[in-house]
C-alpha cells in the first residue's frame, strides 16, 4: 500500500482516503464488527475505528472509554493492513454483544419535530444522540477553515468550543430545541 497511514499525513487527505478508498470496501465479514475508519476529528486525536456496537478503537490500540470487545481474526487482519496497533489484551476483552443499529444522528424529520419546524442551520453538520465519548445529545458544527470541529452539548457546554460567536440564526435554532445557549 503506497499510502502511509499515520498522524503525519494531512487530515483532509486521510479523510478522503478512508471515505473513498477504504470504508466502501470493508469486507462483509469485517463490516459486521467494524463500521468505518475516521481521521482525527480534532487536534490531539488520532485515527480511529468506529465499531458497529458504538465502541471506538484508537490507532494506538486502546479503546475509547475502555469500552470494547474481543476482535475476531478478520478484523485484526484488516486493521493491521492500515497500521493500527492491535489491542494487547484482546483475548481478555468481553465477547461482541451484537451491532447496535440505533441511529446516532437525528434525521431531518426528527430535527424538524424537535425544533418546531426549523431546519438545521447550514453551519451545523448534524445533531447526535448521546454516543460513545459524548454523554449528552449534541450538535456537530461544520469544520472551519482550520479543520476544527466544534461540538455543543444540550446543557450549553462546548467540546471543544466554537472559534467564533454564535450567529442569531444559530441561537434561535438552539432555543427552538429548548437547549441551553452557551455563555460565550
Ligand atoms: Zn470518528
Ligand atoms: Zn457525535
Image (spheres, rainbow, N blue to C red):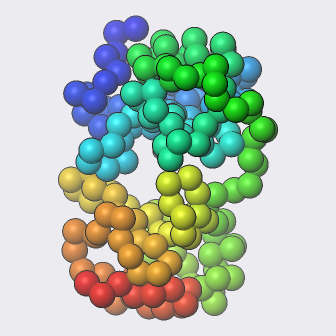
Q: Residue 175: where, in percent of width, then height? A: 48, 91
For the point 30% across and 87% down, which residue is it?
Answer: 183
> Is 87 positioned to the left or the right of 24 in the image?
left
For the point 31% across and 50% down, which residue is it?
Answer: 42
Residue 139 sits above or below residue 143 on the image: below
| Residue at the top extreme, as displayed | 1
Q: Residue 103: where, in percent of width, then height? A: 69, 56
For the point 30% across and 37% down, which residue is it?
Answer: 11
> Is 113 positioned to the left or the right of 98 in the image?
left
Q: Residue 106: where, in percent of width, then height? A: 64, 66
Which of 110/183 is in front? Answer: 183
Q: Is residue 15 visible?
A: no
Q: Is residue 152 visible?
A: yes
| Residue at the front extreme, as displayed | 92
For the point 70% across and 32% down, which residue is it?
Answer: 94
Quarter of image, res 38: top left
Amino acid at each position: 500500500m503506497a499510502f502511509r497511514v499515520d498522524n503525519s499525513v494531512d487530515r483532509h487527505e486521510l479523510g478522503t482516503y478512508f471515505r473513498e478508498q477504504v470504508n466502501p470496501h470493508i469486507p462483509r465479514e469485517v463490516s459486521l464488527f467494524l463500521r468505518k475508519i475516521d481521521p482525527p476529528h480534532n487536534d490531539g486525536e488520532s485515527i480511529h475505528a468506529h465499531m458497529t456496537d458504538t465502541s471506538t478503537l484508537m490507532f494506538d490500540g486502546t479503546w475509547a472509554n475502555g469500552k470494547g470487545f474481543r476482535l475476531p481474526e478478520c478484523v485484526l487482519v484488516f486493521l493491521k493492513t492500515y497500521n493500527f496497533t492491535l489491542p494487547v489484551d484482546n483475548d481478555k476483552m468481553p465477547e461482541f454483544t451484537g451491532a447496535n443499529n440505533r441511529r446516532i444522528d437525528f434525521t431531518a424529520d426528527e430535527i424538524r419535530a424537535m425544533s418546531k419546524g426549523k431546519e438545521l442551520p447550514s453551519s451545523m453538520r448534524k445533531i447526535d444522540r448521546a454516543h460513545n465519548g459524548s454523554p449528552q445529545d449534541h450538535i456537530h458544527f461544520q469544520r472551519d477553515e482550520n479543520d476544527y470541529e466544534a461540538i455543543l452539548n444540550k446543557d450549553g457546554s462546548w467540546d471543544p468550543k466554537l472559534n467564533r460567536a454564535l450567529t442569531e440564526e444559530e441561537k434561535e435554532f438552539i432555543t427552538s430545541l429548548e437547549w441551553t445557549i452557551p455563555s460565550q
